[in-house]
Amino acid sequence: MYICPIIYHILKTMRIFITFLCWGFFTLAQAQNTTIDLKSKNVAQEPKCIGIKKSVQKEGRSDFWQCVDSWVYDHFSYPQEAFDNELDATVWVPFVIDKKGVMTVNKDSIDISVPYDKEKDLEKGKYKRIKETSYHIFANFPKVTPAKDSKGKVIAVKGSYPISFEIPKDEDKNPIKGAEGLAKAHEKVLAPVVEEIAYRVGTEHLSKEEKIADIGSFFRATIQRKLQYPPAALELGISGTVVVKVVVDEKGKITGRAVKGPKELWAGAEEIFTNLPDFVPAIDQYGAPIKATIVIPIRYSIAE
């Protein structure tokens, strides 16, 4: 079929125009669906809570985060079954606040951090009630005035919040049971936790994942270089795995304390973590340096 060259040119131009129009729409849709981290410099004005009483106020904490602190504190409850079974955890709840000020939580994205001796309980699903409790605290969060960027435009933002489920203990490190224990656990719900990990000096430019990998490489190399078999244990034929809690304190100093395994091997394992270079300390959710713990198993075996 014959088409006038002028009309053909117009059709070609229209197709090009439609293509650009679709691409522009797609780009706009992407921009509209973008969520910005609450701690980003692109957030000029944080969300503003409506009708939430600030029962918790911490110096240096912004109005929005004081509002969230108060909501979590006022709506926290330790699941009785988890409390009775002495299940400790730090639960990180990721959330999104859309342009209408509505908070949503992806339940599957909730992250639960537990002590090393409770990892099997986590795998067995014993922390299900703790996860559900954390989810419902944020799923029922009241509508807020949405955040804005530097141009005054309403934006969608995302964040993450830690909830501490900590079994309180007495001076002898025995769990405090009953109503007294539950009350003390409630007081610890907003306890400082590690938000930004400790890392080696000079690795500031690395991502979180890269810093974790770097720390792993550093400690593997350190163990290979400094590991020595205690003569007395070697003579007695003692072998096994020693679990060491490596602590990076608030000043970045490193110490190691053996907590599990043949005691004849403890001193040697702890010696590995002496005289090590300082780290950059971890930072808690309130912006202060905090002690961080890394659990490292060390295997001692005697070659036959």
Image (tube, rainbow, N blue to C red):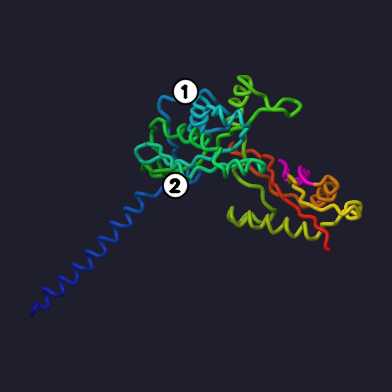
In the picture provided, is 289 more to the left or to the right than 75? right
Q: Read off the magenta span.
A: 247-261
| 86 over 107 or under it: above or below | above
User: Residue shown at 50%/39% (left/top)?
Assistant: 93
Front in this rendered view, residue 253 or 8: 253
User: Residue shown at 58%/28% (left/top)?
Assistant: 58
Q: Where does residue 53 sit, x and y in percent of width and height?
A: 47, 23
Q: Where does residue 213 sit, x and y in percent of width and height?
A: 64, 57
Q: Amino acid at mark 1?
A: Lys
> Is residue 252 covered in magenta?
yes
> For the residues marked 1 and 2, what is the alpha-carbon distance in whole angstroms?
26 Å
What is the chief secondary structure element of the magenta stretch? Answer: strand
Quarter where residue 292 is shown: top right
Which label was assigned to residue 98?
none
Farthest top residue in view: 179
Q: Where does residue 123 sit, x and y in percent of width and height?
A: 57, 45
The residue that mark 1 highlights is 53
Q: Amino acid at mark 2?
A: Ile
Quarter where residue 84 is shown: top right
The quarter in which the C terminus is drawn is: bottom right
* Secondary structure state at the residue bearing disc 1: loop
> Is residue 256 covered in magenta?
yes
How many other residues sit within 10 Å of disc 1, few (<14), some (14-19) or many (≥20)?
Answer: few
User: Residue shown at 19%/70% (left/top)?
Assistant: 13
* Secondary structure state at the residue bearing disc 2: strand
Which label was assigned to residue 36?
2
All told, the count of numbered labels is 2
Q: Where does residue 129 sit, x and y in percent of width and height?
A: 51, 34
How many other residues sit within 10 Å of disc 2, few (<14), some (14-19) or many (≥20)?
Answer: some
